[in-house]
Image (cartoon, coloured by chain):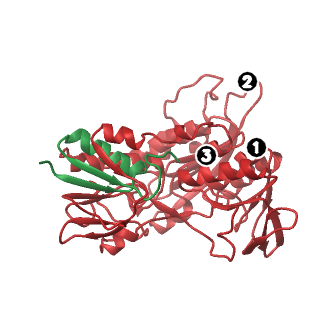
Chain colours: A green, B red
Amino acid sequence: MGKRLIVVGAGAGGGSVAAEAKRRDPSLEITMIEQGLHVATAA
Amino acid sequence: MPYYIGDVIKEAGKLTARTPEKFREGGIEVIIDTGVAEVDEQRQEVRLADGKALPYDFLALATGAEALRPGIPGEDREGVFLLKKLADALAIKSYLAAIGCRRAIVIGAGFIGLEVSEAFVNRGIETEMIHRGKLPAARWDPELGAALLEEMKRRGVIFTPQTELISIEGGDTYRLRLNTNHGPREADIILIATGIRADTRLARAMGLTIGGSGAIAVNFSQRTCRENVYAAGDCCESFHRVSRRWVNIPLGDIANKQGRVAGSNIGGTPRTFPGVVGAQSFRIFSWEAAAAGITEREAAAAGFHPVSALLWGNATAGTMPGPKKIGLKLIADRATGRLLGAQAVGEQRVVGRINTLAAALWAGLALDDIGYMDLAYAPPFSGSWDIIHLAAQNLLRKM
């Protein structure tokens, strides 16, 4: 089983963390948690 | 988002880089509409607001920034908005459409307030900007801020400076009334854009180190004071390559880069974030504003000996028809001749100049280098001496 990554916040920063971590290590189990209704939003 | 409110960007879908479905297709689980109640570092678990507990090996905090409220009675009334999240932009746009908004008040004259005032004017709404200070864009020299103010007034924005807020209540002619030390002002919508602050609530609850800027302290790998906890984006600090201090500059481009660095390290590929030079830009109607580096005040606080000069010139060659004004201020260190900061406003090609100077700041170049730097020249783009050369040589004479 891969290691587990939790990302708190799915804006520009959080979306980038999750996407890049998965790209570098596909075995990671990643969950992003977002307070709002939208993810990966542009300013 | 201001361009979505102003109908320049028509579809809200264009404002999201990736949907939750797209993340899930890529093997990343997404839980929306859910807050984090606490992080139990002993058990390495994140407890969600709904009670569910999720175990982790690595944790990344990307909690962003929260919009500041002035703290006056009535600021939560219907028709009073902040603009931080996409949900805010959607709510503002549907409110505008639903009520047939005639008049708007924008509180705050930073770039969000300025961009939204342009959006309101472009929708045919009479717009008044209420500001605590004297001029818009406080980071820019007063002479440059005054030029931006001229452009705003030409386009019909009413600018009310040096104003203290008292309260918001129901209006007579319009829906809302804002009471100020200069008397009451009415409007159908009030936008509060008085700044944002790093959201460090979860980090503080975990006892993570908070830096001098008030944001989460990280190292060059985006790691916090804990081995397996990272941070990225508006919630954390960045190393400023000019002042050599840790700062908090909440901008989406920085968040993307920090996020990628954090993700790369978590995924096992070492990478460091090289820092920032404070490059930023915005547009107000047909004027551009951009800046990089530090201000004279920041320079003095960091122990430099700042000296500065502001030069007005032309964005294109003087021989070309239709001259376009551009004002460029440079700040340098008297002790070393090194460039410390650059600020510009103008009708054309402002951001390109500041990007060039951002590269100079990044590399630590001195005015001597900049005054004779080889830049792309052709009459539609610059004089044979670009305003960058002229401003550097002008400031050198003052050193």
Q: B380 above or below B232?
A: above
Q: B201 above or below B292?
A: below
Q: Secondary structure at mark 3?
A: strand
What subunit carries mark 2? B
Q: Identify which residue, A33 or B53, lies in the foreground.
A: B53
Disc number lying in front (3 or 2): 3
Q: Amino acid at mark 2?
A: Met
Number of the label disc, if any, that sits on residue B282: 3
Residue B357, given in percent of the width and then of the height, sits at 51, 42
| Residue wearing tag 1 | B123
- Tell me which label, 3 or 2, sits earlier in the chain: 3
How many C-alpha atoms fall within 10 Å of the one at disc 3: few (<14), some, or many (≥20)?
some
- On the same chain, marks 2 and 1? The answer is yes
Number of the label disc, if any, that sits on residue B133: none
Q: Identify which residue, B176 or B160, lies in the foreground.
A: B176
Instruction: Please give left or right for residue B108 compared with residue A20 in the image.
Output: right
